[in-house]
Amino acid sequence: MIWTIRNKQLAFFAAIIGAISFFNLYSQYRLSILLDEFQSNLDSYFTMNQYLIELRSLRGSMNRFIREGSLESLQQAMSLKDELNVTLERVDRQSNTSLETYFLLRALRNGQGVCLQKYMEAIELKQKGIPSFFIPYYAADRIAEYLEGYTSQLLNIRLSQGNKSYQALTNRVERSRTLMGVLFLVVSVLSIGFAILFTNSLTRPIQRLAVTAERMAGGDLDTPPVPISSRDEVGILEVSFNRMRENIQRMFRELQDKAELEKRLHAEELRNIDMERSLKEAQFLNLQSQINPHFLFNTLNLLSRSADFEHASQTAELVRSLSHLFRYSFRKHGPSVSLQEELEFVEEYLRIQTLRFGNRIRYMRRCTVEVEQISIPAFTLEPLVENALLYGLEPKEEGGVLRVKISRCGDRIRIRVLDTGLGMEKEVLKSLEGNGDRSRASGKGIGLKNVRARLRIFFDAQEEFKIYSKKGRGTLVWISFPIVEKPA
């Protein structure tokens, strides 16, 4: 028989499984014996206690029947009479054969028979209306008291015997535990021995293969052939390894050719991506160039002068504010603008909205910092103000107040945009706190989500962006970020 790796594995695992199975079966057998004995004691305690409960229930039912004449109590008493006989038989079967137990059981059987007979006489006399029914009833009740005492004595005896049995069980458990430990140690030693024999038959030839493979991996392709050490699968592996050594140079050249081809394909793919990006940029610039800001500003200036000539001062002011907004929007911003520029943009926007809403909207600004040298991303405040107007104050018939407060705390700037509008439901607020957005897109598609994302990028995740709102009271957007001075 050739000891192949499969045969070695089967022998090893069969030995281990056999040892573990024997250990497990023996443990289960010992445990089942101990559990059966323990369960027998528990059943005996339970049966005696059940007999005591049934006896007391019988006394209670008979007492209610004698005093009240309740048919329900009579039915319960008759049912308990039959259950007492069955339970007493179980107590007799589960009790040991000691002399003291024998006399107590005999007293229980005799006393129960007399007690039940007296109860039946009392029931018969009670149903016939004979006043002397109290005589057999009290006699039976007296006997029942003795029966309770006998049962308690029997239970105490059983508990005492159970304690001794428990001590014996404890000793047997300790002996079984010691035996299990010895068996476990024997199984462990045998398993380790088999494991050493099995691994040596596999690892030594593989180690020789590993040394040769490492030399080839280092570039030494002229290594001598690996000696054939066995006739099992490891030997087949050694033969195959020698064949692989002869073909590895050819395979290496093929891999080099494939790598060069993949490199050229990747370069071509990158060029295609660059061309596609350039095409999109050209399309964007083409669309952007379709709007001529110079022509638009000239037209707005013409409209403003016409309004002045026609003495329409409000229209002229509206056109000039709109012109300022367009100039800010079309201007090529760098990565940031000053907080001063952003506030001026918000002022122009609110000037237009004030003409629209009239006295319904009151705007208040409080700034205690020098905003000229503080940098923030462009279009940061306007979306917050727009959301406050459109979704907080505009739907409110009586209007409200919009406050913008800017302050400094240490090396951080705090901006608060507060409105006394309708506020938000808790579900909407949770959605916003989860990076949701309640705003419809503004002219440049900037909403709360966009503002939060750009602040996170600009300040390298050092910003804080919180929203507080209460239905019917208003909304507060609270922003805090480190001071970044505007470059000169």
Image (cartoon, helix red, strand yellow):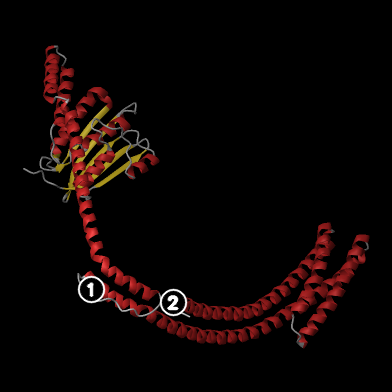
Is 273 positioned to the left or the right of 9 in the image?
Answer: left
Q: Amino acid at mark 1?
A: Arg
Quadrant of residue 220 within the rendered picture: bottom left
Q: Amino acid at mark 2?
A: Thr
Q: Nearest the camera: 159 or 216?
A: 216
Where residue 84 appears, as percent x and y from the top left, is 80, 70
Where residue 97 appears, as percent x and y from the top left, is 76, 85
Residue drawn where x is 18% and y is 43% of the image? 271
The furthest residue to the left: 488
Q: Quadrant of the C terminus?
A: top left
Using the image, determine if residue 89 lies above or below residue 470: below
Q: CA distance from mark 1 to mark 2?
A: 28 Å
Secondary structure under the numbered disc 1 in the rendered image = helix
The answer to whether any part of residue 281 appears in the image is yes
Using the image, determine if residue 29 lies above or below residue 342: below
Q: Which mark is residue 122?
A: none
Secondary structure under the numbered disc 2 in the rendered image = loop
Q: Are marks 1 and 2 in contact (CB under 8 Å)?
A: no
Q: Which mark is residue 215?
A: 1
Is 72 positioned to the left or the right of 373 in the image?
Answer: right
Mark 1 vs 2, N-terminal side = 2
Where residue 484 appears, as percent x and y from the top left, is 14, 47
Is 136 positioned to the left or the right of 391 in the image?
Answer: right
The furthest residue to the top: 310
Residue that carries the numbered disc 2 in the rendered image = 4
The answer to whether any part of residue 480 appears in the image is no
Residue drawn where x is 68% and y is 84% of the image? 161
Residue drawn where x is 35% and y is 80% of the image? 229
Label 2 CA crowd tier, 10 Å (few <14, some 14–19, many 20+): some
Label 1 CA crowd tier, 10 Å (few <14, some 14–19, many 20+): few
